């Protein structure tokens, strides 16, 4: 490292001034000197280049901010200069200006009151750093983040929709398009809890197609599938309320939950289902009860302390057995 020996203090001072000016001129920060009347006295080459000004000296002695800056910047910078003058403190701001060609340039500026000797402010030094590229990069990053967030939200919605559809698919019988046994298992628990809380009865119907095995054997499984589909649709239309549930329990059996329904009303609904099923007119000449498809229905109805899932199902199943033994094509209420 070369050591410079100065013969006088003046030489040291001149060297220091030269170094300072060289640093200011070649610094990426734009340095400006503003007098107490807010006139521009000096601007370093960084600012001159950023603003595309050919000859900065023509602006020396003129009001700062310069006339081609946007009014919003001029107002903000003027307010900052006044604040620095009145408070004697350093003031910072970040705002955009327009270069000589009208392009937007962003600067982060620090306004420093300079005192050469004593407490009196002699001038202001404004050091500005060009933050245009940084802001553009941040804007681009924000755009990318926004686009990514939109994609994530879209993907999340798609996954939610897919999960909902999977849930629907897992709870809908693919053949008859009505709820399956899984839904019945959940709903019967919910209905029992509601019935006990409201001190109301809950009824269960078990519906079975008479001689369905023989129908399948004679006419084929396609015919059997159509029979199940038509019966499921007929049962749904026969239920008086939206709160009533029909579900395919398995094979040719259907279960029907009737909340807040006693045995007398449940029997009336069951009879409506039986009559509507026969009126479908589905040929069924293997039956010994009719020339068209018929159904047998078992009915159970429980309330209060007697109401539980096991007994509700067992009693409906026993009633269905009695209906079958009684000649089919009939409804039977469980009786102990």
Image: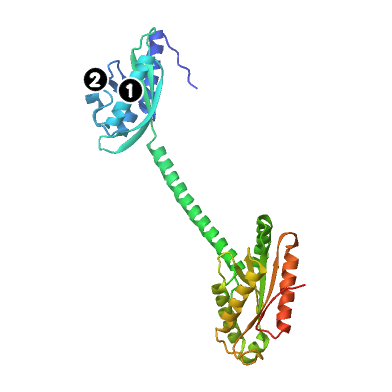
Crowding at mark 2 (Cα within 10 Å: few <14, some 14-19, many 20+):
some
Task: Determine whether the residue tagged by mark 2 lies in a helix, strand or loop.
Answer: loop
* Number of the front mark, 2 or 1: 1
Viewer can see residue 17 = no
User: Helix, strand or loop at disc 1?
Assistant: helix
Q: Position of residue 58 (x, y in %)?
A: 22, 25
The x, y position of residue 287, in whole percent, is: 65, 90
Marker disc for residue 46: none
Looking at the image, residue 329 lies above or below residue 76: below
Residue pointed to by mark 2: 61
Considering only vertical position in the picture, is 234 above or below 8? Answer: below
Q: Residue at x 65, y 85 (%)?
A: 212
Q: Quadrant of the C terminus?
A: bottom right
Which residue is at 32% across, 30% downward? 47
Disc with the residue nearer the chain's start (2 vs 1): 2
Q: Percent position (x, y) of residue 60? A: 25, 22
Q: How many residues crowd mark 1 within 10 Å: few (<14), some (14–19), many (20+)? A: few
192 displayed left or right of 129: right
Q: Position of residue 82 (x, y in %)?
A: 33, 19
Which image quarter: residue 310? Answer: bottom right
Q: Which mark is residue 79?
A: 1
Q: Please indicate whether residue 86 sits to the left or right of residue 245 in the image.
A: left
Between residue 223 and residue 26, name the one nearer to us: 223
Residues 14 and 207: in front is: 207
Q: Looking at this rendering, what residue extends furthest in the front direction?
A: 264
> Is residue 281 visible in the rendered structure shown here?
yes
Looking at the image, is 115 positioned above or below residue 309? Answer: above
- Furthest residue to the right? 336
């Amino acid at each position: 490292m070369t050591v410079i020996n100065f013969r006088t203090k003046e030489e040291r001072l001149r060297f220091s001034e030269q170094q300072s000016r060289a640093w200011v001129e070649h610094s990426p920060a734009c340095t400006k000197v503003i007098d107490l009347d807010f006139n521009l006295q000096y601007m370093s080459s960084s600012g001159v280049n950023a603003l595309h000004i050919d000859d900065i000296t023509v602006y020396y002695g003129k009001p700062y901010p310069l006339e081609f800056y946007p009014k919003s910047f001029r107002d903000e910078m003027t307010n900052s200069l006044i604040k620095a003058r009145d408070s004697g403190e350093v003031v910072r701001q970040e705002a955009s200006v327009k270069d000589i060609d009208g392009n937007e340039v962003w600067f982060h500026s620090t306004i420093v009151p300079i005192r050469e000797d004593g407490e009196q402010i002699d001038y202001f030094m404004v050091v500005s750093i060009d933050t245009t590229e940084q802001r553009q990069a941040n804007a681009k990053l924000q755009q990318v983040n926004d686009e990514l967030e939109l994609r994530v939200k879209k993907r999340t919605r798609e996954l939610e929709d897919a999960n909902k559809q999977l849930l629907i698919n897992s709870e809908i019988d693919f053949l008859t398009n009505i709820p399956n046994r899984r839904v019945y298992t959940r709903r019967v628990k919910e209905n029992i809890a509601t019935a006990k809380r409201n001190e109301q009865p809950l009824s269960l119907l078990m519906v079975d197609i008479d001689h369905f095995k023989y129908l399948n054997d004679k006419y084929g499984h396609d015919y059997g599938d159509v029979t199940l589909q038509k019966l499921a649709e007929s049962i749904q239309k026969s239920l008086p309320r939206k709160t009533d549930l029909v579900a395919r329990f398995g094979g040719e059996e259907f279960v029907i939950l009737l909340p807040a329904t006693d045995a007398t009303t449940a029997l009336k609904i069951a009879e409506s289902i039986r009559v509507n099923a026969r009126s479908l007119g589905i040929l069924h000449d293997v039956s010994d009860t009719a020339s068209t498809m018929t159904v047998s229905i078992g009915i159970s109805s429980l309330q209060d302390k007697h109401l539980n899932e096991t007994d509700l199902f067992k009693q409906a199943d026993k009633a269905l057995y009695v209906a079958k033994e009684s000649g089919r094509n009939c409804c039977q209420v469980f009786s102990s």
